[in-house]
Image: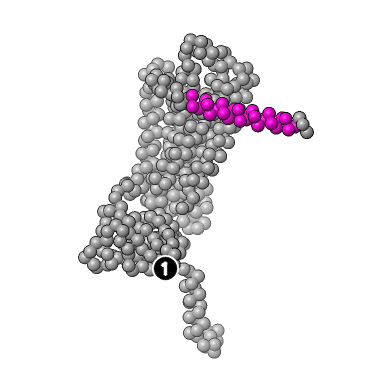
Amino acid sequence: MSRTTLDLWVGLFVALGFAALVFLAVKVGSYADASGGTTYAVEAAFDNIGGLKARAPVKSAGVVVGRVGGIRFDSQNYRAIVRLDLDGRYEFPVDTSASILTSGLLGEQYIGLDPGADSEILKGGDKLQITQSAVVLEKLIGQFLFNKAAGTPAHETPAQ
Amino acid sequence: MNALLRRLGAMTVDGVWRLGFMARFFFALLRYSGQSFRRLPLTIREIYFSGVLSLLIILVSGLFVGLVLGLQGYDILQRFGSSDALGIMVALSLLRELGPVVAGLLFASRAGSAVTAEIGLMKTTEQLQAMDMMAVNPIARVAAPRFWGGVISMPLLAAMFSAMGIFGGWLIGVVAIGVDDGAFWSQMRASVDFRYDIVNGAIKSFVFGVAVSLIAVFEGYDCQPTAEGVSRAITRTVVSSALAILALDFVLTSFMFRGL
C-alpha cells in the first residue's frame, strides 16, 4: 500500500476516533454544563442530611445551580456541615434557605435553595443560616402512627 | 517432597525473572521511543495495522452490544416504570465498563495477537539479530512503533465502541420500542458527567492499551524462536491480555468509582 493511502486511512481513523470522543462529550455527557467555570463555596449546617451524597445537585427553582462539594461532621455541635459549590454565574441573597429534598418518591436527594429577600449577596465562605433537614421516612411514619393513636379514643375506632 | 519444593522454587524464580525482564523491556521501549518517533511513518503504519484494520470488528461489536443493552435494559427498567432512564443505563454501562473492557479484549485478540505473531516470526527467521548486526536497534525499529501504534489506537477504538453502542441502544430503545427520544437524551445528559464518567472511561482504555500493547510486543520479542514457540507466544498474549484487562479494570474501578 502506498504511503499516501496509508496516511489517508490513519488520518480518517484518528478523525473518527476524535469525532466519537466529541460526540460522547457533547451529546452524551454534560460537558457544556460542567464547563469548569468559576464556583464559590458556601456552607450550611443540617441536623440530619438523610441520604445526601457528595456531588448531589443543588437546585433553585428546579434549575441546577451547583453541586454538593463535601460533607463533614461537626463534632462540636453534632451537626452535618455541607459545602455547596455554587456556579459563579448565579447570585443569591444572604438570607437564602437550604433544604434537603427528594426528587420523586424514591429519587436521589438534592439541596433546594429558596432565595430570601436581603439585598446583600452570598459570597464564598459564607454560611447559610436557615436550613431544613431531610425528611426521614421512618420518623414521619412513626409520628403519624403516634398522633393517630393519641388522637382517637379507643371507643371511636372506625371499625364500628 | 524435595523435588516438588524445587519445582515450586524454579517456577517462582522463573516468574520473577520474566517479570523483571518485562519491566526492563518496558523501560527500554520508553527509552528508544524518541528514536522511533523520529521516523513517524513507522508508527503511522502500525496505527493502520492495529487501529484501522480493527475498526470493523469494533464498530460491529459495539453496535450489537448496544442493541443488546437496549433490549435488556428496557426489559428491566419497564418493570419499575422508569424506561425513560434507558439512555442513562446504556450510556453509563458503555462508558464506564463495557466500552473500555470489551474493546480492549477485542483489540487484544485482533491486533495484539497479530503483533506477537509478526515479531515472533521476525525473531524465528533471525531478522531481529540481522538488524542488530547492522547496528539497527530492533527495539526502536520494530517494538516501539508497534507499542505506540497500539497505545494510540486503543482509546480511539474504545470511544468509537461506546459511541456505536449508544447509537445501538438508541436504535432499539427509541426507534424500535418507542421510548421518548427527548427523555432518552436529556436523562442521559443529566446523569453522565464529563469528568467522572467519560474521562475515567478514557483513562481506563488508555491503561488497557498500554497493557495489551506491552504484553503483545513483549511476548513476541521473548518467544522461543520455533514454530511452536510462536504459536505459544500468541496464545499467551491473548490469555494474559485478557487477564490483565479484567484485573486492571477491577483495580481502576475501585479507585475511580467508589460512590464517594
Q: Relative to B14, is A7 on the left or the right?
A: left
With respect to residue B215, does B131 lie above or below? above
Q: Chain of mark 1?
A: A
Under mark 1, the amino acid is Asn
| Quarter-of-image position of residue B171 | top left
Residue B58 is situated, as x and y percent measured from the top left of the image, at 48, 33
Q: Residue furthest front?
A: A76
Q: Residue furthest top?
A: B134
Whether the magenta-drawn stretch holds residue B40 is answered as: no
Q: Main secondary structure of the magenta part?
A: helix
Q: Residue, x 64% and y 28% (percent of image)?
A: B14
Which of the pair B65/B191 is nearer the observer? B191
Q: Residues within 10 Å of mark 1 (few under 14, many from 20)?
A: few
Residue B127 is situated, as x and y percent measured from the top left of the image, at 53, 13
- The residue segment tinted magenta is B4-28
With respect to residue B62, does B50 lie above or below? above
Which of the pair A83/A152 is nearer the observer? A83
Q: Relative to B121, is A75 on the left or the right?
A: left
Label count reads: 1
Residue B98 is situated, as x and y percent measured from the top left of the image, at 50, 41
Q: Residue, x 65% and y 32% (percent of image)?
A: B12
Q: Residue, x 52% and y 53% (percent of image)?
A: B76
Which of the pair B58/A44 is nearer the observer? A44
Whether the magenta-drawn stretch holds residue B11 is answered as: yes
Where, quadrant-wise, is the N terminus of chain B in this rendering? Answer: top right
Whether residue B111 is visible here, answered yes or no, is no
> Residue beneath label 1, please?
A77
Residue A143 is situated, as x and y percent measured from the top left of the image, at 48, 76
Q: Residue, x 62% and y 20% (percent of image)?
A: B224
